[in-house]
Amino acid sequence: MKTEMAIAALAALAQESRLAIFRYLVEAGPAGSTVGSIADALDLPAATLSFHLKELTRAALLDSRQEGRFIRYAANFGTVSDLIGYLTENCCGGKPELCGPVCSPSTSSAKTIRKRTPA
């Protein structure tokens, strides 16, 4: 992964709603979810959701496909894998076997998707 692509992906994720959308779609797996389901799950207005989906897609973090009247979005796991690799490629001086689980993704974070609460 090139530095410019990593910066675009990280910038796209550096916003609360986009991060929530992305995490929701990661949890949904390769099948992804329709726009309506994402909006309902995260309590986001259609116009706001559309803007954030566009930004995540532009950063190659999401893929979309038309299904009749609906659009289904899914996390682009290839880009995610490339980003993680980019961020950890020099782990422990380029010898990740020395780091063991330190360079592995953490499983300690909460696994629930929470609806946004009105501010």
Image (cartoon, rainbow, N blue to C red):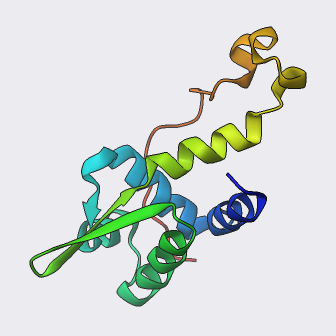
Horizontal side of 61 relative to 85 (left or right) equals left
Residue occupying the far front of the picture:
2
Q: Is residue 10 left or right of residue 91?
A: left
Looking at this view, name the residue that lies furthest to the right.
93
Percent of width and height locating residue 62: 44, 63
Please provide percent x and percent y for residue 14.
69, 64
Residue 30 visible? The answer is: yes
| Residue at x-position 63% and y-position 27% | 106
Q: Residue at x 69, y 15 (%)?
A: 101
Q: Residue at x 48, y 84 (%)?
A: 51
- Above or below 109: residue 66: below
The residue positioned 60% from the left and 45% from the top of the image is 82
What is the tally of numbered marks visible in this picture?
Answer: 0
- Is residue 93 shown above or below 74? above
**Front-most of residues 91 and 109:** 91
The answer, for residue 113, to whether it is visible in the render is no
| Residue sitting at the far left | 68
Q: Nearer the viewer, residue 29 or 91?
A: 91
User: Could you say which quadrant of the image residue 42 lies in?
Assistant: bottom left
Q: Classify the position of the C terminus by image quarter.
A: bottom right
Q: Position of residue 23 (x, y in %)?
A: 48, 52
Front in this rendered view, residue 42 or 98: 98
